[in-house]
Image (cartoon, rainbow, N blue to C red):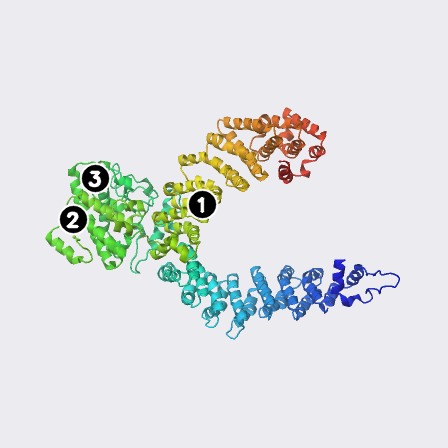
Amino acid sequence: MADLSLLQEDLPEDADGFGVDDCSSESDVIVVPSALDFVSQDDMLTPLGRLDKYAASENVFNRQMVARSLLDTLREVCDDERDCIAVLERISRLADDSEPTVRAELMEQVPHIALFCQENRPAIPYAFSKYLLPIVVRYLADQNNQVRKTSQAALLALLEQELIERFDVETKVCPVLVELTAPDSNDDVKTEAVAIMCKMAPMVGKDITERLILPRFCEMCCDCRMFHVRKVCAANFGDICSVVGQQATEEMLLPRFFQLCSDNVWGVRKACAECFMAVSCATCQEIRRTKLSALFINLISDPSRWVRQAAFQSLGPFISTFANPSSSGQYFKEENKSSEDTSVEDKNRTRDEEVPEDAQIRPEDVPTDPTVSNSSVKLEGAPDPDIGAESPRKPPGDSSLPCPLSSEPHQEAASNEDDKKLGTCRSASRLEVGSSVQDSAPLDQELYNSFHFWRTPLPEIDLDVELEQGSGNKLGPEGLEGTPEATTPASANITMATRKELEEMIENLEPHIDDPDVKAQVDVLAAALRASSLDTCDEASEAARRAPQDELPGCRLDHGTAGPLTSEAVENMESALRYIHDDSDSGTSGGFSPDEERRAKVQDVVPQALLDQYLSMTDPSRAQTVDTEIAKHCAYSLPGVALTLGRQNWHCLRETYETLASDMQWKVRRTLAFSIHELAVILGDQLTAADLVPIFNGFLKDLDEVRIGVLKHLHDFLKLLHIDKRREYLYQLQEFLVTDNSRNWRFRAELAEQLILLLELYSPRDIYDYLRPIALNLCADKVSSVRWISYKLVGEMVRKLHRAAPPTFGVDLIRELVESFGRCPRWSGRQAFVFVCQTVIEDECLPMDQFAVHLMPHLLTLANDRVPNVRVLLAKTLRQTLLEKEYFLTSASCHQEAVEQTIMALQMDRDSDVKYFASIHPASTKISEDAMSTASSTY
């Protein structure tokens, strides 16, 4: 009756002749006409007739219904092209409706109608372009806000589905949007048009955006009258930059971006801070480092707290744009690097250095060795003593005598004798480096600049074949322990070559002495040269003239005198080169003064000011002056920052990471827990074991909200650890069964999921001793979802242990399943045993012949179980799972006879459900559809 009353209200003009009869005097019964009377009238009309009838109605609801049913009408007349065109013409007339709700309803149907027209192009060609698109474009300037919004949504949907031709975009859409953003346009319409232009830019592509959208967008960025327009431009600035590319961004957009970042409205500046990463991605490294960094520092120190808050949230993502994938340490273990990958890494790293235009680097001078880790640089200057001077050079990976230039702290504590031997090795390597400098052709001397060659970070050095052949001194293993007579002549050449090289390095560094980093390098090199020289008054005065005292205090350069290297000289040279080349903090903490150590920790991957601001996000004062959740934002972006800096600069972030890991807010610790496995991949196995494992252990004992982050990626983290370290966590897995809230069943379900993955990391004995008890415990969980995953866990455990040699653990596990579940006094345990057997059959965890021997006899005994639920599940398993296996279909064995006899017994069961599932054909139902319902309803 409700529907009928609505129909009567909607169609008052059609009620003539079918109206309500007057009440008779004899009775008060009202005679209501049947709705079929109205339906019969509509059935007599054609689709176009009904459309015309209700489109001309004075009732607004009728016209809304017409707009809503346009697609159905088109489908009815799609076979007749003329009728389709007639419907589209009526849509054009309906678009002129004075009621905004009708126009809005029509616009909501346009994308669906356009898709229909696209699918039926042969019948109604150009229908969308001629009839529908003009309506969409016209509604963009409609006076009603709802109509404008629906038209904007329709336009974006059409562009996303590529239903608008490129020609129409250029000639019909873009000109209208440009016109709507004219200075004399309505304020609201202008703001919305700018937003549409920005959103459609990624859909229309670079060419149209640069020609038709970008000029007006740049004008809108400078709109002095309406800050709303500037705010929209700032919010979408990154999208425009990503579309137009680097050149247009740097030439046209960056000046506007600088203006927006200094806008007098804080909302505009805040929008700029939010899109800073996208803008940075569209610029070159030089502009990113020199201009955008300073601009971002201004936003971080903005007077508005909201701007500072947005800037700090974008700081980590902005730092990540400085990442160089070739030098960010993507390899978890260093020995997994190939020589080709390492070569590409070093070449890209050298290419990214900021060098003058006239400086060039010879790629052949910076070969690489795949065995070198980030914490050491190795020189391979000693050929095999058994190979003559004319023998070809061995590949880098086969070098027989690598000599590390930087050592770990524990290596520096070696005996004096070892230090002397190591110093001799390094000196011999330096000899050939000096020879390569002396013997180079004049052209190479012009192209080569030692300042840029020794600029950090320095790849390992591999000597050229011809340089090795030209060197008269060959150093074998016996040279390390040789007599002084054999060492002294070589030491003279070594000293001369080393001093010449150091002098050349200092000369090239002097023009850049204003740089504090360069000044520090000059000081260290000068100290090394001073300690290794046999100074004379004349040579000291010459050195003083070349290097003034205010730049190189106490530096004395020796040009010609040759003599044996003292241990002090060797140590100073090692210290100097270690300072220049060192890629890790472990190498710098051994012998530097506090100032030198502080300078050594200053990285050169990102501007130091940005990193300092990022590290300050853990300062408690930031939570009061910027954002109470600023530490969470710092934790969220820390893996990206660590990847950008590379594992060689982890020392810059270690203290910050430890501070975040002990933060009072559990949300901060939770964020770190969810990403610790990613950070482990970035840092590598050694740093992970030293710095991340203690924090990981702390998270294991934290709140459940933090522990779940560790648990979800438990396998991802443990697989990165050494096997011995990994086994230590076997004793702690049991603790995951205990939660703060016993109702937190999802925690236990995630544990079961992770245990399935952990099976591949442990031996069969470890699985049986430590994982088996947890799995059996989860199989008896109170929640069916946990039990269901646990059945799969036990099945995979059976598979793993059965395939082990010998399969004794698998047999023991099956025996325990039978004892604990198959013969359990509780019916729920016996039902769990049937579920486990079903999983083993479906996933083929055991060969069917082995299943028939070890599990099936115990499974068939449950046909006499006193609980119908167990027998129902048994009937499903036998009929729908077991009998579908090839082994039981083809082999005429005693096992097949036993199964058939059991099914026949279940078909005569006193319970009707048991009879049903034992009798139906296996293909008629699927056990997976009702297994969960059975489990949840019977426990």
Determine whether the residue tagged by mark 2 lies in a helix, strand or loop.
Answer: loop
Can you say which quadrant of the picture contains the C terminus? top right
Label 2 CA crowd tier, 10 Å (few <14, some 14–19, many 20+):
many
Which residue position holds label 3?
420
* Amino acid type for the residue under numbered disc 3: Lys
Question: How far apart are the two marked residues, 1 and 3, measured between alpha carbons?
Answer: 46 Å
Left or right for 906, reference 639: right
Residue 673 is tagged as 1
Q: Which residue is mark 2?
A: 533
In the image, taking residue 20 as reference, residue 842 lies left or right, namely: left
Q: Nearer the viewer, residue 262 or 371?
A: 262
Whether residue 847 is situated above or below residue 78 in the rendered picture: above
| Circle 2: residue type | Ser
Q: How many marks?
A: 3
Q: Nearer the viewer, residue 886 or 602?
A: 602
Q: CA distance from mark 3 to mark 2?
A: 18 Å
Assess whether mark 3 and mark 1 are in contact (beta carbons under 8 angstroms).
no
First in sequence, mark 3 or 2: give its number.
3
Q: Residue furthest left?
A: 537
Decide which of 347, 521 is in the foreground and name it: 521
Instruction: Tell me the CA gap for discs 1 and 2.
Output: 54 Å
Mark 1 neighbour density, 10 Å: few (under 14) some (14–19) many (20 or more): many
806 vs 935: above or below? above
Q: Are marks 3 and 2 in contact (CB under 8 Å)?
A: no
Which of 882 and 336 lies nearest the eye of the viewer? 882
Counting from the top left corner in percent of width and height, residue 78 is at 69, 61
